[in-house]
Amino acid sequence: MEHVSRAGANGARLKTHLTKRRFSNQEVANILFGMSMLYEMKGVEFKPRAYERAAHGVESAPDNLQDIFAERGIEGLNGIPGVGAGIQAHLVELFTTGHFKEYDRFKKQVPVDIMGLTAVQGVGPQTIKTLWRRLHIKDVDDLEKAARAGKISVIPHFGKTAEQKIIKNIEFLRKSGQRFILGFVAADVRRLQQMIARMPEVEKVEVAGSFRRRKETIGDVDLLLRPKNRSA
């Protein structure tokens, strides 16, 4: 489909062709979080944090970014927190072609389930990188098989204790349901906090638990409430 995006230098209206696929802000944010983790796995400085900030900015945007781009072009992406010119160019590519070439290239180099593996407590980007290089572990099933076979404990800096923790954390994940990467759900947690804080009966609300401790993943959200009428 095509949409008018901006005016040219001669005043003529230019048109932007968009991909038929429609991306939600959360899908875009997930790609940016993925880029952050892939850069961290590669040991690149600064970019992991830059992509993480951009992902948070996209998550918190009140309107769909692809719709904004369709209506206003790249100028419509200005003002999104953390989204500078470089990342804007990637978003334009995504919205017009349906692909993020750099992300696709990284995923081919390291074809792992980042969201799934980081849902296991204690498994972060560097652990994923080591396990991929040493054992070609792609997902949680591969991770569990390797751990139960004793293949992880022989990797330098891991050992039996780390291997047993991985097994226990996978068991916990399967029993308790999915854990979520902190960055992926931070905006939703803050929106929930703000929504509860607006209730007339609530004086103060704080997020506690693993979210406040900034753990890599969380399984639930703990909220501490102080009612306005304490005698009630």
Image (cartoon, grey):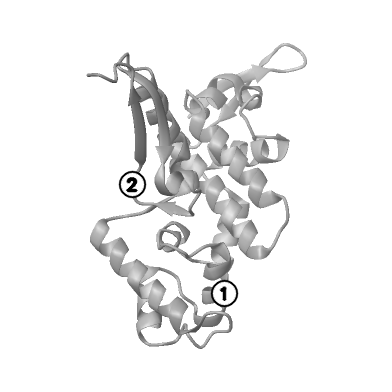
Dividing the picture into quadrants, the one containing residue 74 is top right
Q: What element carries label 1?
A: helix
Q: Using the image, determine if residue 174 lies above or below residue 160.
A: above
- Give the residue at x 26% y 57%: 176
Dividing the picture into quadrants, the one containing residue 54 is top right
- Give the residue at x 69% y 63%: 43
Residue 130 disc label: 1
Q: Nearer the viewer, residue 204 or 51?
A: 204
Q: Residue 113's x, y, as percent?
A: 44, 62
Q: Using the image, determine if residue 150 lies above or below residue 18.
A: below
Residue linked to disc 2: 220
Task: Please rate how many residues cluster around mark 2, counting C-alpha atoms within 10 Å: few if below 14, some from 14 to 19, many from 20.
Answer: some
Tell me which label, 2 or 1, sits earlier in the chain: 1
| Closer mark to the observer between disc 2 and disc 1 | 2
- Residue type at tag 1: Thr
Q: Which of 50 and 95 is in front in this view?
A: 50
For the C terminus, the image quarter is top left
Q: What element carries label 2?
A: loop
Q: Residue 227's x, y, as percent?
A: 32, 22
Q: Using the image, determine if residue 17 lies above or below residue 94.
A: above
22 with respect to 78 (left or right) = left
Q: Which of 185 and 21 is in front in this view?
A: 185
